[in-house]
Each structure stands twice: as structure tokens, then as C-alpha cells.
Image: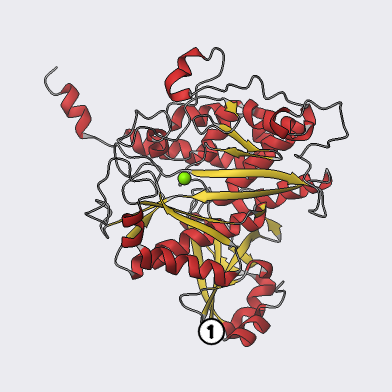
Amino acid sequence: MTTDLAKFAADNGVKYFMISFTDLFGGQRAKLVPAQAIADMQEDGAGFAGFATYLDMTPAHPDMLAVPDPSSVIQLPWKPEVAWVAGNCVMEGEDVAQAPRNVLRKLIDEAAAEGLRVKTGIEAEYFLLTPDGSQISDEFDTAAKPCYDQQAVMRRYDVVREICDYMLELGWGPYQNDHEDANGQFEMNWEFDDALKTADKHSFFKFMTKSVAEKHGFRATFMPKPIEGLTGNGCHAHISVWDMDGKTNVFATDPDDSSQTKELGLSDQGRYFLGGIMKHASALAAITNPTVNSYKRINAPRTTSGATWAPNTVTWTGNNRTHMVRVPGPGRFELRLPDGAVNPYLLQAVIIATGLSGIKSQADPGKRYDIDMYAEGHKVRGAPKLPLNMLDAIREFDKDKALKTAMGAEFSASYVKMKLQEWDSFVQHFSQWEKDNALDI
Ligand SMILES: [Mg+2]
């Protein structure tokens, strides 16, 4: 593990470091620092005006410093003279409470205090579009059911291979790449890891995919629903929880313990963790589905491929992709709610926050529904519908005092405030739909 960035630069021929942090809206912000200056920056951090980003600060706030975490450093495989390093935001000697990486680090410490280590893998789907973002980049990619399309994935082999080669080089353990369910959509999978490592990799994957796509004359987007009528970009999270040495999966059942229900191979702790996620689902959507556009992916009408692959109701099941949570096998489960706009750090943070609260309160995940939710969802009684739009989600989050406390009071207040400002900006926007429906009234 890297501890000295100046030495890392000397050993690897790095000329510049990007000291990067992620704001509340998932934007990655960075300063390029020459290697000669990195030793001082590692001590003191790189200075930023917080107000210039989405961190709920004013122009009068003092300098915010992003102090690089050397253990996160990644040399850019496509430009090896530059290295990316995640920074932790600090102001006047204190962690900035609402900064997403700090929110996550605090929750990881809280899990550790309970002897738990949360590990996750994510599936960051993306589209390859034309450079102006108006349409998919491949004019031949028009099949009604394009998932796993062999010809279409090979037409974008140069992009997919380059990204996968880089992940191999970085030691992420990538293991499969495919054309996804929408025309122009792809997914690449790499191994699961500790929550903070996954969040850093998720951030870097977005940066890398956009950079490689640009190099090839395309535009990569993780936008939840970039094209009307096609399947959206999900960011499914596979979750398991381990003991502190990372050897024992505490979600897996102990065959000698007859006191546990062991439903679908989940231990009691796994069940309670899931129960926490189920209990707070409507509120956590404000984090996992953070944009106006997110709600065009969940609750969407059927797509041209036949299914949205996104949930609309707070339900769980076994190996069945029509629910919010799928338990594909023993010892882990998949949260299918998050979309491509999710903030990589807040995604992990909200999983840990809700899961830990579930363990503490021994939350019951409720009845399991082994039905096709897209065809038979109307048969489910009493399961909450997911929020229908961003405003409803933010209001649900704002009502959920326990979740707001678990995510941190300062973070929660800032997040609600800034998201409501975003909603105001959206409703002030005039659309063609309004004219189409009101012009002749
Ligand atoms: Mg997928």
C-alpha cells in the first residue's frame, strides 16, 4: 500500500498528481499538482473554494483542503505520467462533515466498531453516445433485444478492451464485459472489495470510461435514463458483510446453528441488514436515485426490450431480477435500486447506514415475494411504492430522522437543502410538454 506519494512518483515516473474529491452531486473535482510539490500537499492538502462546487458552502468560507489519501493512488493507465488520488476534505483542521468520502469513512468506522467490514461490488452500466450526447454512437445497434449482442459488442471492442485491459493492469480482477439491454449500452464487471475501495474504484471507473470513450470519439454516459424508451443505466450493488479480518462472511449461514431461519442462505445478521435497507428504502432512494432523470428509470413504462430491469416497489426475493432486492445465492444480496447517477461514496455510505441500523434494531425484511413483479406486481399488498419523483424522494429522506442521523446531521441538512434547490431549478424550466398540454386550454 502506497504511503509516500513523492516516492510513488519517483518510482513510477509520475509527473503530476490529480488530487480529487467528490462533491454532494457526484461531481469529481481535482487540482493537478506537479510531483515536485506533492510532499507538501500530502501534509497540508490542495486548496479549493468550496462554494465553487456542490458542498453547501458560501464564498465567505475559508479554504477547503483536499488531503490526498495515498492508499487510493492510481496511475492513469492511459497517461502514466499522471496519477489520480482521492482526497479527504478538511477545513480549519476538521473533516468537512458533509463531504461524501468523509461521510463514508465515518460509517466504515461505525461498522468496524461493531466488528463488521462491509464489502460490495457494483455494476456501473453506461452508454456510448455520439460526442454531442444526442444519440447512440453505433448506427447498426438497433435490435429490439440487444442484450449480449455479439456483433454490437465487437463493434465497440476497441473501447471495451482498452478499459478492461486497464482494469487488468490495475489488478481490479475484471471478469466479464457485455453489451447490455439497451442499444448502445455496456457493462463491465470487476471483483468486489471493501466499501471505500469500491467507492474509489467506482469513481475512477467513471473517469476512465469517459476518458477512453472521448479518445475514441464517443461520449460515455452513466445518466440514469439517457434515451427515452430504452433500458436505463443501473448501478446494482452486491453486498456482503465480513468480520474484521475479512475471512468470515457474516451473511453466510452457519450449518451447525439451528436457531437461524437461514432463508435463502442469509444469516440472521444478513436478514437484519436487509431489513434495514427495506425499512428505509423510500428515503434512501434520495441517495441511490439522486437526479430528476432517475425517476424515469424506476417506475418506467416497459422498454422496447420488454423490461426496464429497474424496480418500482419495495420488495425482495430470491434469484429474480424484477424486485428491488435479489438474493442470487447464499451469503450476499443485490440492491437493484441505484442508478448511474449515484454518488459512489454516498451509495456505500447509505448501504452501511441502513444496514447497520437494521442489525441494531433486528429489522425484519418482511415477506419475500417470488413473483414476476412486472407482470404480477398488482398482487402485492402493503409494500410501499418507490418515490415517483426526486421531490418525493427528498421529502421521504427529510422525514426519516433515523437515516438522517445515521448519515450525519450536517450532511443530511446540506443534501436536502441543495437537492431542493435543484428541484426548484427543474420546475422553473419550461418544457414542450407544457405547451403541448396547455396551449389550447
Ligand atoms: Mg446490467
Q: Tell me where residue 263 appears, x and y as whole percent.
A: 72, 27
Report if residue 402 is visible in the image.
no
Name the side, left or right, on which 408 lies relative to 372: right
- At x 58%, y 70%, the residue is 170
Name the quadrant of the C terminus.
top left
Residue 62 location (% of width, % of height): 59, 60
- Secondary structure found at label 1: loop
> Residue 224's quadrant in the figure?
top left
* Placement of the N terminus among the 4 image quadrants: bottom right
Residue 3 x/y as whole percent: 72, 74
Q: Is residue 246 visible?
A: yes
Residue placed at 40% from the left, 67% from the top? 212
Q: Nearer the viewer, residue 156 or 284?
A: 156
> Given the image, on which type of amino acid does mark 1 rest?
Lys
Instruction: Count every numbered label the image shows and give the total.
Output: 1
The residue at which mark 1 appears reads as 15
With respect to residue 308, does 383 lie above or below?
above
